[in-house]
């Protein structure tokens, strides 16, 4: 009977850790869904005839799109690629926060070489894509 109790005391914590890891552990990146398609089809800047997807494809190299949902249930589409910026090719991350019904979006953070950029710098970069 004593061995059984010790075994149960080991199995329960391992089970709890397993369940926690399953729900909160690393998630596989989503690279193709409706939110990504929506952002790629929107104009790169207001009143532009070039879509966001085409603009990034033409201007940047080694690019990819990812979708994730934040803990606050926001839908985020993130572009990651190597783009010409300030006279050199640099890694760029640009986030779009999309409304649930895919009716609107707002620009999120932009990182260049891991450093967050200002709204003005982000706007300047998007104007380069035209």
Image (cartoon, helix red, strand yellow):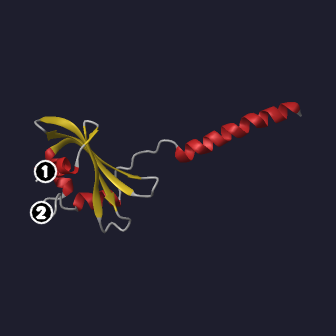
Give the mark, 2 or 1, whose residue is nearer the N terminus.
2
Point 78% across, 37% down: residue: 8
Observer-nearest of 111 and 18: 111
* Left or right of residue 75: residue 51: left
**Which residue is disc 2 drawn over?**
49
* Left or right of residue 28: residue 83: left
Coordinates of residue 107 in the picture (x, y in percent) = 27, 56
Give the quarter of the figure containing the N terminus. top right
* Left or right of residue 114: residue 25: right
Observer-nearest of 120 and 101: 120
Coordinates of residue 39 in the picture (x, y in percent) = 27, 59
- Above or below residue 23? Residue 42 is below
The picture quadrant where one finds residue 76 is bottom left
Point 84% across, 30% down: residue: 3
Coordinates of residue 44 in the picture (x, y in percent) = 17, 57
Point 20% across, 56% down: residue: 52
- Which label sits on residue 129? 1
The picture quadrant where one finds residue 73 is bottom left
Say what secondary structure mark 2 lies in: loop
Point 20% across, 36% down: residue: 90
In the rendered image, the residue lying farthest to the right is 1
Coordinates of residue 130 in the picture (x, y in percent) = 10, 54
Q: Residues within 10 Å of mark 2 (few under 14, many from 20)?
A: few
Say what secondary structure mark 1 lies in: loop
Q: Residues within 10 Å of mark 1 (few under 14, many from 20)?
A: many
């Amino acid at each position: 009977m004593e061995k059984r109790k010790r075994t149960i005391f080991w199995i329960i914590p391992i089970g709890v850790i397993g369940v926690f890891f399953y729900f909160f552990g690393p998630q596989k990146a989503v690279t193709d869904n409706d939110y990504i398609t929506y952002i790629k089809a929107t104009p790169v800047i207001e009143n532009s005839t070039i879509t966001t997807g085409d603009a990034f494809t033409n201007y940047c190299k080694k690019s990819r799109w990812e979708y994730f949902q934040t803990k606050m249930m926001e839908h985020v589409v993130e572009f990651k690629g190597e783009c010409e910026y300030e006279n050199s090719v640099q890694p760029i991350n640009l986030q779009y926060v999309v409304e649930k019904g895919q009716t609107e979006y707002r620009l999120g953070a932009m990182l260049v070489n891991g450093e967050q950029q200002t709204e003005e710098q982000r706007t300047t970069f998007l104007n380069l894509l035209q």
